[in-house]
């Protein structure tokens, strides 16, 4: 099964090289889709091995796939497939050298995220997350407009500051291991209890590493790069960044948290993550109330959801299955919405909500999937975001964090009202009678990946086998109980 560790790294890298060297429109168009499919297939193979009672698959001390990393790899592939397949029309609009670099960077982006979740060394994990910054910086500035280049530079500067802080934290964690018999950066070894790590160094290193990775995951107050980057990037890139890059950074926080919990206990990072989560919800609620740009609306929604996930991580093992379910559900829904936002932008020619009205009557082919996906994002059942949010809130009450989850609930209600108002403004109502029109029933791109994403999020919360078992095994990897 070792080949499943190499496949999500080598196939996207090879396709990236081919996209740059071979002048083939079809290759450049479909290579990101093929890269996503390879990552997803590898993740599903590793999940199958884990569920069938196999031990974690590893390659030396660098790559390792346990239940958590296999699940995250599948999330990367699934969200990547929805974003790239659904966003094929975006790539088709590019020509020549630009199309080649765009497809190559998408494949490298997928390979870097795959490496981040498969790395056993937290140093290698850091390097992979830094590689995502390099790849996505060029993707954010793909349109070469003033605003997109400004967003790219802002992303590079703030993202680099974040990963630099995380690197300092990882250095301190390594320094804490020097006094033991096995100086290492292996997450598997560092998370063992009784290793004799220096508590002071672990406290400082863990805090810095979490702060740095929180910047990449879009948590407030380090979130300011996110709305600009996600609103200016091409739709498939926005879907990947919002749907899975933020979750990969959260995965890094989970790994660091497991190390600190084994040495100093959960209270320190619990406070830190709770504050970051509530502040993220507050920022999202404040800015969504009067939001005028639908792509920025989706970006601020990502801050909201990452904030609630951070609260779930702070709660601990009782909430972790819900957090992991949340990661996949949010990723698929957000990828769907960003793909649809790209199509709406292409057809309507404006990102301003006030200028995009009566969609359900004028463009039902876009409005219907948009309404369904927004219902899922807001948290309506039977979509999995609803069950994940309920799981986090009930877990918070059960462990004595009632004040935190009560504050989160109030902010979630404000966000619910804001998103509902903005969605209604875009979709409902009828055009004036003196403006004749013909309803546009085209989806303006592949509809199958969007349907698959919506169906998956509507059903997976009800599947005890294998989804429930996998989530519990992934939780046990992080110190939870089966």
Image (cartoon, helix red, strand yellow):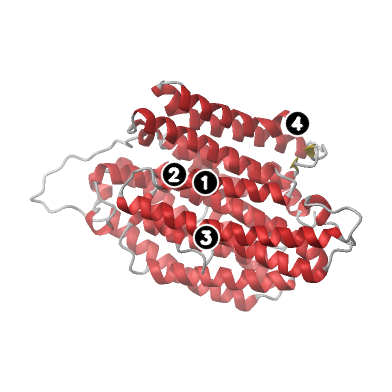
Q: CA distance from mark 1 to mark 2?
A: 7 Å
User: How many callouts does the rendering have?
Assistant: 4
**Residues at marks 4 and 1, CA–CA distance in whole angstroms:** 28 Å
Q: Does residue 458 appear in this view?
A: no
Q: Is residue 168 left or right of residue 378?
A: right
User: 271 left or right of 411?
Assistant: right
Question: Which quadrant holds the N terminus?
Answer: top right
Do the numbered discs 2 and 4 sit on residues whose CB atoms are within 8 Å? Answer: no
Q: Nearer the viewer, residue 233 or 475?
A: 233
Return the disc, 4 or 3, that comes first in the chain's sequence: 4
Residue at the image point whose x is 30% and y is 62% from the top:
292
When asked about the image quadrant of residue 391, the answer is: bottom right
| Residue at disc 2, secondary structure | helix
Q: Which residue is mark 1?
A: 134
Please name the residue that numbered disc 3 is placed on: 218
Query: Which label sits in the foreground, 2 or 3?
Result: 2
Q: Looking at the picture, does residue 35 appear above or below residue 134? A: above
Mark 2 highlights which residue? 138
| Percent coordinates x, y for residue 434 in the rendering | 7, 50
């Amino acid at each position: 099964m070792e080949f499943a560790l190499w496949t999500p790294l080598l196939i996207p890298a090879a396709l990236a090289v081919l996209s740059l060297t071979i002048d083939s429109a079809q290759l450049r168009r479909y290579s990101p889709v093929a890269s996503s499919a390879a990552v997803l297939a590898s993740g599903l193979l590793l999940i199958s091995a884990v569920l069938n009672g196999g031990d974690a698959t590893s390659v030396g001390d660098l790559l390792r796939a346990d239940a958590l990393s296999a699940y995250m790899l599948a999330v990367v592939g699934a969200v990547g497939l929805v974003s790239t397949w659904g966003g094929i029309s975006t790539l088709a609009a590019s020509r020549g050298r630009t199309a080649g670099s765009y497809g190559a960077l998408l494949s490298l982006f997928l390979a870097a995220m795959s490496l981040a979740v498969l790395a056993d060394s937290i140093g290698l994990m850091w390097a992979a997350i830094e590689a995502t910054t390099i790849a996505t910086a060029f993707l954010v500035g793909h349109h070469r407009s003033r605003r997109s280049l400004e967003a790219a530079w802002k992303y590079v500067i703030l993202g680099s500051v974040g990963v630099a802080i995380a690197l300092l934290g990882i250095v301190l964690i390594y320094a804490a291991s020097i006094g033991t018999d096995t100086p290492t950066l292996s997450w598997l070894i560092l998370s063992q209890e009784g290793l004799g790590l220096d508590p002071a160094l672990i406290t400082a290193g863990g805090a810095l590493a979490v702060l740095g990775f929180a910047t990449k995951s879009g948590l407030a107050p380090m979130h300011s790069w996110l709305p600009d980057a996600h609103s200016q990037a091409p739709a498939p890139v926005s879907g990947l960044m919002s749907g899975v890059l933020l979750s990969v950074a959260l995965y890094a926080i989970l790994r660091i948290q497991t190390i600190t919990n084994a040495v100093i206990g959960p209270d320190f990072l619990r406070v830190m993550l709770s504050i970051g989560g509530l502040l993220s919800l507050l920022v999202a609620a404040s800015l969504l109330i009067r939001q005028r740009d639908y792509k920025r609306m989706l970006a601020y929604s990502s801050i909201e959801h990452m904030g609630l996930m951070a609260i779930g991580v702070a709660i601990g093992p009782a909430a972790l299955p819900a957090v992991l379910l949340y990661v996949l559900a949010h990723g698929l829904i957000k990828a769907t919405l960003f793909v649809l936002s790209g199509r709406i932008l292409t057809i309507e020619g404006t990102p301003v909500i006030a200028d995009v009205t009566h969609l359900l009557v004028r463009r039902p082919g876009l409005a219907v999937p948009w309404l369904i996906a927004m219902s899922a994002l807001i948290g309506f059942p039977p979509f999995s975001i609803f069950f994940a949010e309920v799981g986090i809130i009930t877990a918070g009450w059960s462990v004595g964090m009632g004040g935190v989850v009560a504050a989160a609930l109030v902010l979630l209600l404000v966000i619910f009202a804001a998103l509902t108002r903005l969605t209604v403004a875009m979709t409902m109502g009828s055009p004036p009678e003196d403006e004749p029109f013909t309803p546009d029933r085209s989806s303006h791109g592949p509809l199958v990946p969007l349907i698959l994403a919506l169906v998956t999020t509507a059903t997976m919360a009800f599947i005890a086998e294998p989804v429930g078992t996998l989530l519990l095994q992934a939780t046990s990897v992080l110190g939870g109980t089966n």
